[in-house]
Image (cartoon, rainbow, N blue to C red):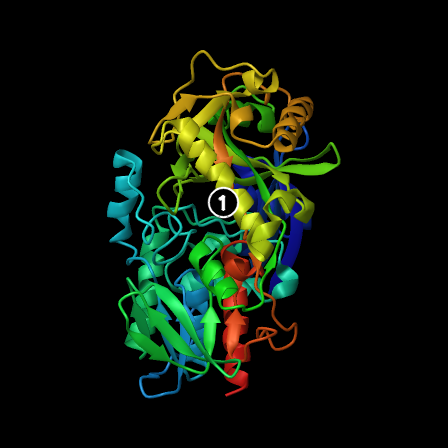
């Protein structure tokens, strides 16, 4: 027999089978001798009180043998000779769109401007050590997209958009830990995600699809307001009546191409700010209300939101036990982001702290039309490059110094490999962003006692939180409002925000495209 319960336990009880069994027996009244297995279905941490607790949803097996269920991949069939669908971009939206095409009997051709997931490593090393940015292969571009080497966080609030568990199951089928189906904030880790991405690519190829690297699209061929194909930078052309455009939030050349061809796009609000780094031990102390984190607790995350001067200011992509990475996609700019390995065992934590932007903030760039937000974003990144010394060295300031408008006389050690240089960040940000951040950090310090410290350092800027452009599409068909056969998809189109929501959107775009064939 099986029984489902929700209960609150200590971290040690949650991690120890014997103790958890005793707890379940006391909670349920079921004799221990009858309990044959306890399967944890959901797990979350509650650190609101002095003693941290774990919320569990469990399935208890009594007087029956437990058989571990395996998660199998769909029965993909060979689609070598089937109708072709072009997919531009091999991030989560593009890859999951390709898998869904195969599942539905169509041949995906995935065109990725960057390199395969292993070859990307050399370009990441070049930007970290030599400050050289390859505009086609970096933390944002290449197989797997921005998430591959930027953590693999799987938490999403987008449950209304589609079946989150389906995407998690597929990831488990491709080698991710089954724990991602249990944890409230699942995470794969930058050290483990590349192999999963490579396995997805191999599955696409083995079943008749194509994945082509170093294939940057330079033109979208349109005839009579309908997609006809694309042209690559090397002159190669690919013909198709269906094009899923899944290029990610940093493919500025695609936005510029669409605008040049008078294909309807529009400016979209996004958020921008800094990436802050604290010691992980301090965040553990604040969040767990202890001197030293217990052995049964993971490195503590945090999430914080404030209204400051009428604007939202919030933490974004928080990385416990992680490092800060240089995520520029072109020479002459600085972009910061963060990631964690699967164990989250680095001594520092980092998080984007960003300010919400509005369309009216882009007024000085209105001559750029729908690219106004993109130009606003670009100017700040280029100014950071100049202030940082015209390398990938990031402009930085200690946290309290920032709130007091003082240039930091020294800077702490940072996980940001290219290095940092002391700068008054008023020279990087517009006044309204700088003032919102200043006041917001003071408010953060009142909510999280100890958070406002001069041992923390701000790296500028955190600017790629989401796309500054939306590519409008029909709510029912997902087809572009103007161009037949064009399916704007994922984060780059303004319809997703993270790996899971992008993957869901990729599947849906594939389904919509195939439905009209």
Judge by depth and name the residue closer to the eye, 315 or 223: 223
Res. 297 visible in picture: no
Around disc 1, counting alpha carbons within 10 Å, would you say few (fewer than 14), some (14 to 19), or many (20 or more)? few
Residue 125 horizontal side relative to residue 316, left or right: left
Res. 459 visible in picture: yes
Tell me the residue at 48%/27% (across/down).
280
> Given the current orientation, which residue lies at the most extreme front position?
367
Q: In this view, does 341 lie above or below 57?
A: above
Residue 35 horizontal side relative to residue 409, left or right: right
Tell me the residue at 59%/28% (across/down).
288
Tell me the residue at 31%/56% (across/down).
195
**Residue 330 place in picture, x, y as percent:** 37, 46
Question: Which quadrant of the figure has residue 214?
Answer: bottom left
> Given the current orientation, which residue lies at the most extreme right position?
310
In the structure shown, which secondary structural element does the residue marked by tag 1 occupy?
Answer: helix
**Residue 506 place in picture, x, y as percent:** 50, 68
Quadrant in which the N terminus is drawn: bottom right
**Residue 322 place in picture, x, y as percent:** 42, 35
Q: In this view, does 286 lie above or below 489?
A: above
Disc tally is: 1
Q: Is residue 352 above or below residue 235?
A: above
**Residue 274 place in picture, x, y as percent:** 53, 33
Judge by depth and name the residue closer to the eye, 61 or 299: 299
Q: Is residue 180 above or below residue 87?
A: above
Question: Which residue position is annotated with label 1?
Answer: 17
Question: Which quadrant of the figure has residue 419?
Answer: top left
């Amino acid at each position: 027999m099986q029984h489902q319960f929700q209960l609150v336990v200590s971290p040690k009880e949650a991690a120890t089978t014997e103790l958890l069994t005793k707890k379940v027996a006391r909670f349920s009244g079921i004799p221990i001798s009858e309990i044959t297995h306890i399967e944890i279905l959901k797990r979350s941490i509650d650190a609101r009180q002095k003693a941290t607790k774990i919320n569990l949803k469990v399935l208890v097996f009594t007087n029956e043998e437990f058989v571990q269920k395996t998660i199998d991949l769909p029965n993909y069939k060979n689609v070598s000779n089937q109708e072709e669908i072009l997919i531009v971009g091999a991030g989560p939206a593009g890859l999951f769109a390709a898998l869904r095409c195969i599942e539905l009997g169509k041949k995906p051709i995935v065109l990725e401007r960057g390199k395969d997931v292993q070859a990307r490593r050399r370009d990441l090393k070049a930007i970290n050590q030599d400050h050289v940015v390859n505009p086609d292969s970096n933390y944002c571009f290449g197989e797997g997209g921005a998430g591959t080497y930027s953590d693999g966080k799987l938490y999403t609030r987008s449950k209304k958009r589609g079946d989150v568990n389906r995407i998690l199951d597929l990831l488990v089928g491709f080698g991710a830990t089954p724990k991602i189906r249990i944890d409230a904030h699942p995470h794969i880790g930058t050290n483990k995600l590349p192999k999963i991405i490579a396995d997805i690519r191999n599955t696409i190829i083995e079943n008749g699809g194509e994945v082509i690297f170093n294939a940057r699209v330079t033109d979208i061929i349109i005839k009579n307001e309908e997609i006809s194909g694309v042209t690559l930078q090397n002159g190669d052309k690919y013909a198709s009546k269906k094009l899923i455009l899944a290029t990610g939030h940093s493919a500025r050349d695609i936005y510029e191409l669409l605008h040049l061809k008078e294909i309807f796009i529009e400016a979209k609000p996004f958020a921008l700010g800094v990436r802050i780094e604290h010691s992980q031990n301090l965040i553990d102390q604040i969040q767990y209300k202890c001197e030293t984190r217990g052995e049964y607790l993971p490195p503590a995350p945090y999430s914080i939101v404030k209204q400051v001067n009428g604007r939202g200011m919030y933490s974004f992509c928080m990385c416990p036990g992680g490092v800060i990475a240089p995520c520029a996609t072109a020479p002459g700019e600085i972009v910061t982001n963060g990631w964690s390995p699967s164990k989250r065992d680095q001594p520092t934590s980092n998080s984007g702290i960003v300010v919400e932007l509005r369309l009216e903030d882009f007024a000085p760039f209105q001559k750029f039309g729908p690219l106004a937000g993109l130009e606003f974003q670009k100017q700040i990144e280029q100014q950071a490059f100049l202030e940082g010394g015209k390398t990938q060295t990031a402009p930085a300031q200690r946290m309290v110094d920032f709130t007091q408008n003082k240039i930091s006389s020294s800077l702490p050690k940072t996980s940001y490999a290219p290095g940092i240089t002391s700068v008054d960040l008023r020279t990087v940000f517009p006044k309204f962003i700088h003032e919102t951040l200043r006041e917001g950090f003071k408010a953060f310090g009142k909510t999280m006692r100890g958070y406002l410290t001069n041992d923390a350092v701000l790296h500028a800027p955190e600017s790629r939180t989401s796309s500054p452009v939306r590519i409008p599409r029909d709510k029912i068909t997902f087809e572009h409002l103007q161009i037949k056969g064009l399916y704007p998809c994922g984060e780059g189109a303004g319809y997703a925000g993270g790996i899971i929501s992008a993957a869901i959107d990729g599947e849906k775009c594939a389904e919509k495209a195939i439905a009209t064939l």
